[in-house]
Image (spheres, grey):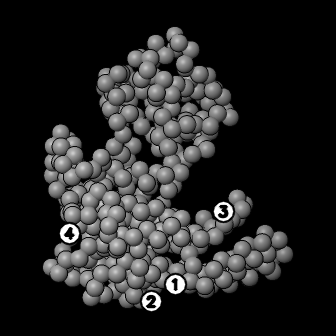
Amino acid sequence: MQLGIVGLPNVGKSTLFNAITKAGAEAANYPFCTIDPNVGVVQVPDPRLDRLVEMVNPKSIVPTITEFVDIAGLVKGASKGEGLGNKFLSHIREVDAIVHVVRCFHDNNVTHVEGDVGPARDIETINTELILADMETMEKRIDRTRKMLKTQDKKFQVELQLLERIQKVLDDGKPVRSMEFESEEMAIIKEGNFLTAKPVLYAANVGEEDLPEAKGNALVEEVRKIAALEGSEVVVVCAKIEAEIAELEDEEKADFLADLGLEESGLDKLIRAGYKLLGLLTFFTAGVQEVRAWTIRKGTKAPQAAGKIHTDIERGFIRAEVVSYNDLMDSGSQLAAKEKGLVRLEGKEYVMQDGDVVYFRFNV
């Protein structure tokens, strides 16, 4: 899972990025301090993996990962080259989803590019630039498709009708993700790589006094209202606090979070929300050589899940031996789970479930 962190300059993007990845991206009180996109790879926190490790005692442990990409602050006119312009819009095209950091705190010591704090205005600024960039992409795509109509291939007529429908939505100032598509249309959408088709997760960056959920913060409520209209989610974070958490050991983190009335860190919340947004789940393989977590999309069948491990396993798939994480923990061991009949033999049509612990049998 790759999440691109975007927002206006000085909203706390790089501070948040530094905190959750410990990657050391520069963070300063002036616009455009991020010039190249910084990429930080973080382990996905999952207590289930820890318990499997305790049970199996493997030689190696491999958690699943999330990549956070810190993209430079966008400003009005970015789609036309203002600020650092199109270079950074292109970076957004590569990510799975967008984490839009919105400033929801007042601090006279941190300047705002617009002069004052206004979440609705800031969100509109970013959305407008992404929509304008998509409109430019759309015009080129429609011109190309019209030329292909000369081949008499009916698929280009279908594609043109879809593109013109999307163009109308963009002209109305709405993102592509606000539309509904048939399954066969999704291939065209994916090929178009539209910025506003990407799912968005809003990270409302608040002051420490507004934790844990900032229910009395009118700025956060602005963000929540906009997110509700889009069908997006909002995660309340405090970049400053996340920076402090990043410096603590695991045991200290738990005490620190408890003192703040928090059950989990901002990183945990962002990753969990990202998984939900993208429709992802985790399955595990567990043996004495290695215990490992794997990320797949919901609806993935067993052979394709096996292909995440190695293409040969998918090609030679015979069956999957599956036990749910909860059943395994209740049993106390893999052997005990088998003796209780909790380990199932599943075939090629089995749809993987979150928390499945699997052993794939194959023959190549």
Residue at image mark 1: 132
Give the number of the disc on residue 26: 4
| Lower position in the chain sequence, tag 4 or tag 1 | 4
Type of the residue with mark 2:
Lys
In the orientation shown, which residue stands out farthest toward the top?
339
Q: Is residue 115 above or below residue 52?
A: below
Residue at image mark 2: 80
| Lower position in the chain sequence, tag 2 or tag 3 | 2
| Lower position in the chain sequence, tag 4 or tag 3 | 4
Q: Nearer the viewer, residue 14 or 82?
A: 14
| Lower position in the chain sequence, tag 4 or tag 2 | 4
Q: Residue at x 34, y 86 (%)?
A: 83
Inter-mark Cα distance, 2 to 1: 9 Å
Do the residues under discs 2 and 3 have CB atoms within 8 angstroms?
no
Q: Nearer the viewer, residue 258 or 306?
A: 258
Q: Residue at x 58, y 27 (%)?
A: 320
Type of the residue with mark 1:
Leu
Circle 4 — which element?
loop
Circle 1 — which element?
helix
Q: Residue at x 27, y 50 (%)?
A: 262
Note whether residue 25 is visible. Answer: no
Inter-mark Cα distance, 4 to 3: 38 Å
Residue at image mark 3: 187
Inter-mark Cα distance, 1 to 3: 22 Å
Q: Is residue 341 above or below residue 304?
A: above
Q: Is residue 164 left or right of residue 77?
A: right
Circle 2 — which element?
helix
Inter-mark Cα distance, 4 to 2: 26 Å
Q: Nearer the viewer, mark 2 or mark 1?
A: 1
Inter-mark Cα distance, 4 to 1: 29 Å
